[in-house]
Image: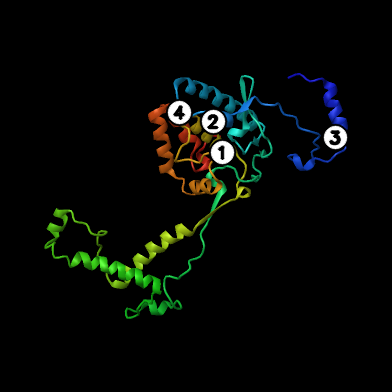
Amino acid sequence: YCFDPAFFEQINNHHKDENFTHLTLSRTDKLCCISFERPDHTLADVFAGISWGTRSKKWMEKSWVVLKQIAKALKALHEQKLVHGHLDPMNICKYGNEWKVAKLGTIQKVGMPMRGTFRASVPPESIKIFKPKRRWPLFDGEYDESALNKKSARVQFSPRVLVSGKERRSKLELVTSSSSIDTQDDFFGNGCFLCEPIREIGSEEEALSAFIQEEESKLDEERATATFSPGGVQASVAWDMWGFGLIMTQLLLGRCINLTNFETPKDAVTKKLQHYDGKVLQAICNQILSTIGREAADIVYLLLQKDPAKRPN
């Protein structure tokens, strides 16, 4: 696009006395205006107009062109020590025959705290897990170290734990008193497992204590809440590498059930990021390996590492 220089002079003269410092990277900078090209369409428009079946060879060839152009744009940005922070299909735009990265509102200098509202392209490190205190203590009563060291001291359990303990004991009695199993060899020979394998435990209290800890750990995980906290993360290239990995995966696979999709609701995205681990990453790479090939799987494996230090920089 070619504009008459007088057009920009007119814009500058009209806005030069206005204060736009809240839109700049630094409060000391002066911003007159930002002008963007009008895109032909966005990557989100492309995703909305296709089916999520198997990708054709022609689609794959075009996808590599798009990814290379996005990578070129990110490289130019990162060379200026800046992080985009919001790689979303809506912000990947096509102008003529070239794809570019748009929307610079979340750009941040490397080393500064990240900012912006929640978006589906945020990486796992931006999600903080908060585990509330337990509603019930493991044991009722005051903690008395001397009493716990005495062999005769008995542990007082809360009512909820006692009910769970009775259910546990009933399962144990069901196995040990079963008339259909005469010997230990018959038990394993028949493959009749009525409950979890029985471990030798010194006392009933120890058995209940182990059961309590297991149940309380499960409850802690269920009650844990995940919160988006961008300010706790320093801006780095790793943030954009995660977003680029999401774009690449959706281009190659479509909607991946193991990964956050850009049209997924906020609570679903947060939950997936909360439980994202190496097993999920391996499942994604296996799917890409079987449908696309080794090279693509290796790239995604690096881009979608949960640890930001392991992503390309």
Residue 42 placement (x, y as % from top left):
61, 29
Compare marks 4 and 1 and give the one earlier in the sequence: 1
Q: Is residue 206 visible?
A: no
Q: Is residue 196 above or below residue 145?
A: above
Which residue carries the number 4 mark? 296
Q: Residue at x 85, y 39 (%)?
A: 18
Question: What is the quadrant of residue 241 in the picture?
Answer: top right
Label at residue 15: 3
Compare marks 3 and 2 and give the one earlier in the sequence: 3
Q: CA distance from mark 3 to mark 2?
A: 38 Å
Compare marks 1 and 2 and give the one earlier in the sequence: 2
Kind of residue at badge 2: Phe
Compare marks 3 and 4 and give the one earlier in the sequence: 3
Residue 297 placement (x, y as % from top left):
43, 31
Q: Is residue 124 visible?
A: yes
Which residue carries the number 1 mark? 238
Kind of residue at badge 1: Ala
